[in-house]
Image (tube, grey):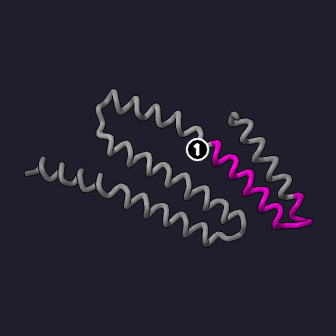
């Protein structure tokens, strides 16, 4: 699927969800969630290409694999948190969606702490 196909899928789901809102509102939410899941899993399938490209960059630049793994974890956390938050907000549970976003940001901060500490040690060694 291309971006155009995904866009058409999303717009079709929204139009059908709006039509179903008058009859059975919960069906619209289910339809939007199902379309979101299809798009989500398609996006995950695209990650293989991204991972291969990052591995090539790592081979050229001789970057420590810990940094690349951390970067990939951060991307995954962001993707899942934004997706989950969007579904919650669309279903009318904006406060729950905001909590998921906050948890995602805190998770990214926690994952990045070892890199921050390594950077601080490097700066300290340079200044000493």
Residue at 30 percent across and 36 percent down: it is 63
Write down the quadrant of residue 85 in the picture: bottom right
Position of the N terminus by quadrant: top right
Q: Is residue 13 left or right of residue 102?
A: right
Image x and y of residue 47, in percent: 54, 40
Give the total of numbered labels.
1
Residue at 43 percent across and 35 percent down: it is 54
Residue furthest to the top: 60
Q: Which residues are magenta?
A: 19-42
Residue furthest to the right: 23
Above or below — where is 62 with respect to 124?
Answer: above
Write down the quadrant of residue 107 in the picture: bottom left
Residue at 61 percent across and 60 percent down: it is 84
Residue at 49 percent across and 66 percent down: it is 103
Residue neighbourhood size for the residue with mark 1, other residues' Cα within 10 Å, grouped as few (<14), some (14–19), many (≥20) = some
Above or below — where is 26 with respect to 47?
Answer: below
Above or below — where is 92 with respect to 111?
Answer: below
Residue furthest to the left: 128
> Mark 1 — residue?
44
Q: Is residue 4 left or right of residue 86?
A: right
Image x and y of residue 123, in percent: 18, 50
Whether residue 48 is in magenta: the answer is no
């Amino acid at each position: 699927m291309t971006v155009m196909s995904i866009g058409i899928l999303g717009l079709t789901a929204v139009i059908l969800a709006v039509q179903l809102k008058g009859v059975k509102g919960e069906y619209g939410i289910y339809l939007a969630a199902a379309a979101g899941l299809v798009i989500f899993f398609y996006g995950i399938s695209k990650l293989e290409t991204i991972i291969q490209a990052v591995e090539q960059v790592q081979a050229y630049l001789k970057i420590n694999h810990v940094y690349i793994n951390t970067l990939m974890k951060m991307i995954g956390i962001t993707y899942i948190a934004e997706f989950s938050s969007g579904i919650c907000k669309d279903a009318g549970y904006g406060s729950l969606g905001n909590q998921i976003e906050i948890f995602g940001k805190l998770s990214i901060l926690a994952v990045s702490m070892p890199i921050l500490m390594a950077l601080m040690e490097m700066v300290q060694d340079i200044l000493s």
